[in-house]
Structure formats: C-alpha cells, structure tokens
Image (cartoon, helix red, strand yellow):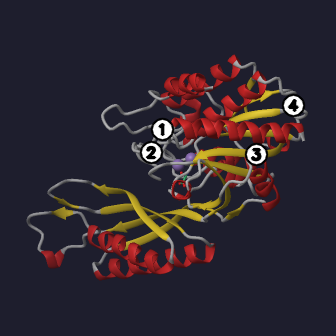
Amino acid sequence: MTSSFHDLWSELEPLGRNDRTGGYERYAWTEVDLQLRAWFAERAAGMGLSVEYDRNGNQWAWWGTPGPGAVVTGSHLDSVPGGGAFDGPLGVVSALLAVADLQARGVRPGRSLAVVNFADEEGARFGIACIGSQLLTGVLDPERARRLTDADGTTLADAMSAAGADPAALGRDVRALDRIGVFVELHVEQGVHLNDVGAAIGVASAIWPHGRWRCSFHGEGNHAGTTRLADRRDPMLPFASTVLAARDVAERAGGVATFGKVLVRPGGTNVIASVVDAWLDSRAPDETTVRSLVDAVAGAAQEAADRHGVGFRLEEESWSPVVNFRSALRDHLVGVLGGVPVLPTGAGHDAGVLAAHVPTAMLFVRNPTGVSHSPAERAEVADCLAGVQALAAVLEDLVTS
Ligand code: HGY
Ligand code: MN
Ligand code: MN
C-alpha cells in the first residue's frame, strides 16, 4: 500500500503547485483543473472503474453498475489560493486506494461503489463554497451559478465552455443524487484535536455553520499628496476599523471572523482609494451566533463608513448551514473502526452539503500541526495509510452489509 500511496501522491503533488511559495493554485475550470481531472480519470480507469461526469462537472468513478443504494466516497482536488497538498486530495487518493484495497483482497461488493471528485469545493475562483455538490443537490440555483464571475470578470459559464463543459446542463441532478445510498468523505483534519488526543483517525460529529459576505466601502478617489485629511472620504479607514471590530465581535460571540481577501480600487500608491471590497468569512457553533456576529460587524462597518463619509454595502455571497451528521451512521463507523474520537469541525465540506440529502459521514486523518489552507499543511504518511485502511474497512462494511 505504501508504494501505491507514494505513487499516486507523487503524481498529483506537482499539479498546480507554485514552486516559489509551495502553495497550490488549483482553481475550477482552469488548465490545472483539467490536468487534475485527467489524472483522476486515468488513475480510476486504470483500476477498472468506469468514469463519467454528471451535469455539474463532478467526476464519478464506478465500481459496478451505477445504481441506487451505491456507497460513494471521495472529496475534491481544487484548492484555496496558496493552499496545502492534503485538503481535498487526501480524500480522493485515499478513496482510490481504499477501493484498490478491496479489489486486491477480492471483496465482492453487494452494492455499487463510486469514487467522486467534486467540482470547485473551495469556491476560490467564483466565490461560493461547494459549487459542484450544491448544484448537484439543487441548493445552488444554476442560473446564479452560470453568472458568477472571477477576478477577471469571466463567468462560470464561459469558464466551463472554454474547458469543454456545458454550462447549460447545470442543475439539480436527480439521477446522480438518487444513486447515492451513503456518502463517506475522508479529509485531513483542519485542527489539532486528533493530535492532542493521540489518535490517527476520527469521525465527524458536526460542521459549524458558516458564510461569506462581500463588504463594499465606496469613498472618493483623490490625490494622496494634495488632498487635505479633512476633505477625504477614504474607504480604507472604515475598512480598517471593521477588520478590528470583526475580531472583537467574534471573540465576544465565541465564533470566528476573518477578512482574508481585499481588493482596493484603483490601487495606486499615491492615490486615495475610491472603492474597497473585502470578504468576511464568519463561523460559529450555531447559526444564531453567526448571524448576530455578522450583524454586529455590519453595524460597526456602517458606523465607521458614516463617520468617514463613505458608503457601505454588505452582500451575502455564500451560506453553509449547520451540519449534524446522523448519529446512527456516525456511531456505526466509530464501531467499525474499533472506537475512535468523534469531533466537530469549523471547515466546510461537500459531505456537509450532501448530509441534508443522503446518509453522510466523514473520517478525519490527524494533522500534526492543525495548519490548513497553507503550504505548511501536512499529515504523516503513516497516518495517511491508516486513513486508507480505515476508509477501506468502512467501505467494506458498507458494501457488504
Ligand atoms: O472554507 C472551508 O471551510 C472549506 O475549506 N471550503
Ligand atoms: Mn478547504
Ligand atoms: Mn476540503
């Protein structure tokens, strides 16, 4: 198993990596995405799996005839800007290897089994999380999806067409969804709980509700040298105080709030900005707390914008409701794995989207530092192999029960 993990991992690793930063730039419907998809199709076909796309660009590799009641596993191959190697790919590689393990041991599934590569889980290019699984389940409106634009103004529809996919097909895919009897996603833990308790594998209990909000501050562009301070309507000032206010509000609310992406227009060193667009990511254990946290941040932003004669607008771009994984399946998997820790996560996943539609569970693999969405993200090979073994045991239980 070690050699095949190394084989798959070393093939995947260089795709979309920025060799200067070591971070990944694997964005939906780009050339890199097509390379990743080709790698997945080739590797799956090499295992005798039949590969197909659904209406929304999700890739499915089938062992057995696609049909209702199938056991499905997998994750995503795309990344956040500057992301790590494990977030997503560990779930896809582990899924392929777990199926290979069942094949090698002569397991005869009583149900079809599929490995899925979900399209655009991170939403790095078009701004919404889990686009492939949200379209599959009908959560995301296809017309809204087609109109989403990236930083260059390219729509999702145009990006898909340029990549040879058909944006007109986007939409709830009942055929694909009805095939799923149960979905299990393996993912590197994005936190240190397993490391703290000394366990290589864990099972998810819940996903925090979370969302993304665009905060726009509209001021007046002007000369940085000749405009008196009293005459300025500088959007950078209310933006700056909003970032600080978000941290205070989150701390008091028991949630998290992050501004990790900001676009300043026009962006000249000697130019007072006219517009600042900044994206707020906020999460908390319950939806009421997230909503009240964001309302408080918006109030602070509006107050600061008023003080500086700047316009302010907040727009919700992405929302992922709280997920509580079904306790019966969760506890069954804990039993199959001989008793492993159960833990919640603040990270969103395709499993979180599917959980509202089909029986769904998640396995986590220890992350020694907990760091994720960073080139520093890592997991020990031994723990990755333990993850493959755990997923293989879970799949064998599910396809033979
Ligand atoms: O944002 C998240 O939690 C996930 O990485 N999409
Ligand atoms: Mn991620
Ligand atoms: Mn992920």
Q: How far apart are marks 1 and 2 (CA)?
A: 7 Å
At 71% from the left and 55% from the top, the residue drawn is 139
Query: Between tags 3 and 2, which lies in front?
Result: 2
User: Cβ of disc 2 within 8 Å of ligand 2?
Assistant: no
**Front residue of this view, candidates 389 and 103:** 389
- Residue 358 lies left or right of residue 160; in this view the side is right
Disc 1 vs disc 2: Cβ atoms closer than 8 Å? yes
Residue that label 2 marks: 377
Q: Distance between the residues labelled 3 and 2?
A: 25 Å
Residue bearing mark 4: 109
The Cα atoms of the two marked residues, 2 and 4, are separated by: 35 Å
The residue to which callout 3 is attached is: 183
Q: Is residue 98 left or right of residue 213?
A: right
In the image, residue 218 sits, relative to residue 264, either above or below, namely below
Mark 3–mark 1 contact, CB under 8 Å? Answer: no
Q: Residue 61's quadrant in the figure? A: top right
Residue 138 is tagged as: none
The amino acid at mark 3 is Phe
Residue 79, position as x, y percentages in the image: 50, 42
Under mark 2, the amino acid is Glu
- The image quadrant of residue 391 is top right
Disc nearer the start of the sequence (2/4) = 4
Q: Earlier in the sequence, mark 4 or mark 1?
A: 1
Whether 286 is drawn above or below 277: the answer is below
Which-is-in-front pick, marks 4 and 1? 4
Q: What residue type is labelled 1?
A: Ala
Residue at (49, 27) in percent of width and height: 31
Image marks 4 and 1: residues in contact by CB distance under 8 Å: no
